[in-house]
Image (spheres, grey):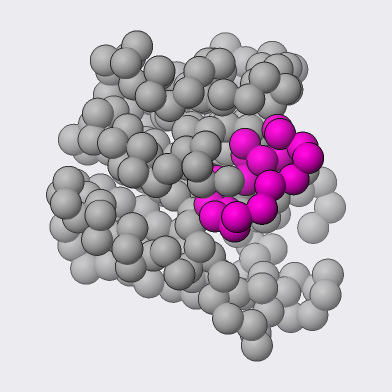
Amino acid sequence: MKIGTDGVLLGAWTSIEHHPFNILDIGAGTGILSLMLAQRSNAQQIEAIEIDDDAFEQCAENFENSRWNDRLFCFHASLLEYIEAVDEKFDLIICNPPFYSEDYKTLDKSRDLARFSDAMPLEHIIFAVIMLLSNKGKFSIVIPFKEEEKFIEEASLIDLFPNRILHVKGNPTSAIKRSLIEFSYHKNDTIIKELIIETERHKYTKEYIELTKDFYLKM
């Protein structure tokens, strides 16, 4: 599975100013978010959950081969299985979830599992946050812009409030495609910003470069 722009943006944008001691990466895929946060933070424990066999093996291998392997742990489990097995709280929960709800499926079951929302309903993610987020913790997620209002409304039912939102556009004339949202249990004025990725094909904006340059070999 290729590393997508959504994951890179979320890993670079997520706040670590509250100095999280432990981090949970829900639906880790190849482990890119966990690795980025290990690079950015001093978190002592970063746990990743991945249900797909091949992605789990690749995630575990990537963790083992990284310079932060003593802080990274990958679990082969579904989100609900993990919730049942763990009773600790996390200072940061991060998730780049599957959110494709089209009726068709491909012939690649692993790609289906990663891309389609029936593998990890957003309601399950909210339930996980209720169970696993510490009082001072932050929850960071990337979702389609069209889902933003509904997701914020559902999160408010468990007293999670949006503190920061980043609206992402592919280019200056395109519609907003993604919403990166950071929630916490503390209600304050939501800071909303916009990010444009490219001015034209393969010509990145200075804002995108500034945000992600620490994670690309060539930028």
Q: Quadrant of residue 196?
A: bottom right
**Percent coordinates x, y for residue 41 in the rendering:** 49, 34
Drawn side of residue 186 relative to residue 196, left or right: left
Q: Nearer the viewer, residue 72 or 122?
A: 122
The quadrant of the picture occupied by the C terminus is bottom right
Residue in the image at 39% along x and 65% along y = 148
Residue in the image at 51% along x and 46% along y = 117
Q: Is residue 143 magenta?
A: no
Count of number-bearing discs? 0
**Secondary structure mostly seen in the magenta stretch:** loop
Q: Which residues lie in the magenta part?
A: 96-115
Residue in the image at 40% along x and 18% along y = 81
**25 up-or-down from 82: above or below:** below
Q: Nearer the viewer, residue 125 or 107?
A: 107
**Percent coordinates x, y for residue 188 in the rendering:** 18, 62
Residue in the image at 54% along x and 76% along y = 176
**23 up-or-down from 200: above or below:** above
**Percent coordinates x, y for residue 182 in the rendering:** 36, 53
Drawn side of residue 123 relative to residue 55, left or right: left
Q: Residue furthest bottom?
A: 173
Q: Residue furthest front?
A: 103
One can see residue 40 in this view: yes
